[in-house]
Image (cartoon, helix red, strand yellow):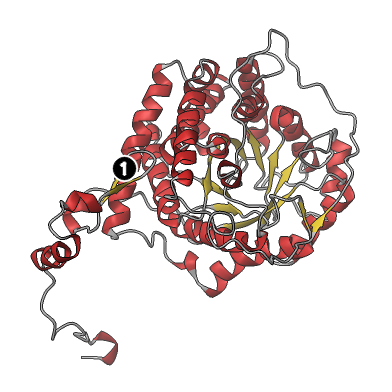
Amino acid sequence: MALDDAVIPLAADFAAARREDWLKLVDKTIKGAALDTLVSHTADGVAIAPLYRAEDAAGAAAPRPAGLGWDVRVAVRHPDPARANAEILDGLANGAASLRLSLDPTGAAGTAVGSEADLARVLDGVMLDVAPVALDAGFLGAKAADWLGALAKASPAAPLQFHLDPLSAFARAGVSPGPIESHLIGSATVGARLATTYPRAGLFLASGQAAHEAGATDAEEIAVAAASAIAYAKALVRAGLSMDDAFARITLGLAVDADYFASIAKLRAARQVWAQITAACGAPRPARIEARSSGRMLTRSDAWTNLIRLTAAGFAAAVGGADALVLGAFTDALGLPAPLARRQARNTQLILAEEAGLGRVNDPAAGTWHLERLTADLAAAAWARFQAIEAAGGIARALEAGLVADAVAAARDGLKARIAAGEQKILGVTQFRNPDEAPVEIETAAAVPVAAPDPRLPGPDSRCPALTPIRYEDLAA
């Protein structure tokens, strides 16, 4: 037998572990109390047992992601186009593989871009056929997609990510400039046209992050993303794409936070839900997931503790099988990131990928009985919420009727109660507060609005209860 083939029986001298022996030890500790007292529950009501066995995870394996590793994606939102361009080039030169560019003609919530020429200045020097550019442009998404498509016209193989997502813009704002259905149709029309020119491009981002940032549970977030994917797929099919091609051009957007077990299970559960949907539509294919670090978990108090939260979130995204990861800066709760914060956000991912080697295994959580059970239970809870949204007429109607907002509000109230009861602790805020916290550096920049096309479409505005972002820190006040 070759040395490499030898099996070293490390546990041969130990008796086999038995559940009965474990129960005897537990009984001594809980002094006759019911074993159920050791069971906890997630915000979705999913039970977390104190011990799992192989049979607990039977049939719960999540679909494995296609390929290894993930796309290290940097977030760029500096209002000044020249500064945004410098940040992009610095990030790509120092290890980032792609970028997510937030656009806002006012400069308040992203880079001040209102035309193809403005976008060209921001992307000057970027090799669009090599570095995927993912847009975040709200109701200007269709216009911005055309601008990006025009800039990449010499590179038909460019892996562009247009990330059209009018539903998230609607959910956040509580109003759309014109009927939301018209924005769906208009975005799909533009997307279908660009799909012909750019066969490798992603068209829509079906995101649940607006719900997450407003306080949603993991199941609700997955359900919103899944229902958005259905709405976008239907719109693309109406615009001329096949069902298979429509799903191939949609990316799921989900948040990851410092609760890494929950976030790992969330990404795996989302893949299960996606697999059910695409199979039912006769177009089975693996999900593509862009994970973004949670903004609601970041604190202004002792912002240095955000480095821990972001590292845990990055770990969860890698182990959960994200295809791309946008990791925020530890100063995001305070303002625009300075060079140190941007470098930390980028290098955290690089260390997880290159030094920890987290991208070398497709699905590290597979076979972990706890995570397999949590994945299956979370997928079932998300599927039930997804069915409720579809029964209400789809995600647009569910938003308008307040179905999503009501569920998010209930989850937010539960979250606030858990924080108040001390069940959910916030490092640096409710626990281990640092009276001598060191200040952090942030960028300051005056927003200079630029002229931009009016995103308004003919017809009455659609309205819904807005999903307003929260922070754990504020719920503890």
- Coordinates of residue 73 in the picture (x, y in percent): 64, 55
Q: Is residue 228 above or below residue 423?
A: above
Q: Is residue 80 left or right of residue 62?
A: right
Q: Residues within 10 Å of mark 1 (few under 14, many from 20)?
A: some
The residue that appears at 55% across and 16% down in the rendered structure is 400
Residue 107 can be seen in this image: yes
Tell me the residue at 48%/67% (across/down).
358
Q: Which picture quadrant has residue 330?
A: bottom right
Residue placed under numbered mark 1 in the picture: 46
**Residue 173: x %, y % from top left:** 67, 26
- Which residue ends up furthest to the top in the rendered image? 459
- Amino acid, disc 1: Val
Q: Nearer the viewer, residue 329 or 85?
A: 329
* Quarter location, residue 164: top right
In the picture, the quarter occupied by the N terminus is bottom left
The answer to whether residue 279 is visible is no
Residue 452 horizontal/vertical position (percent): 85, 28
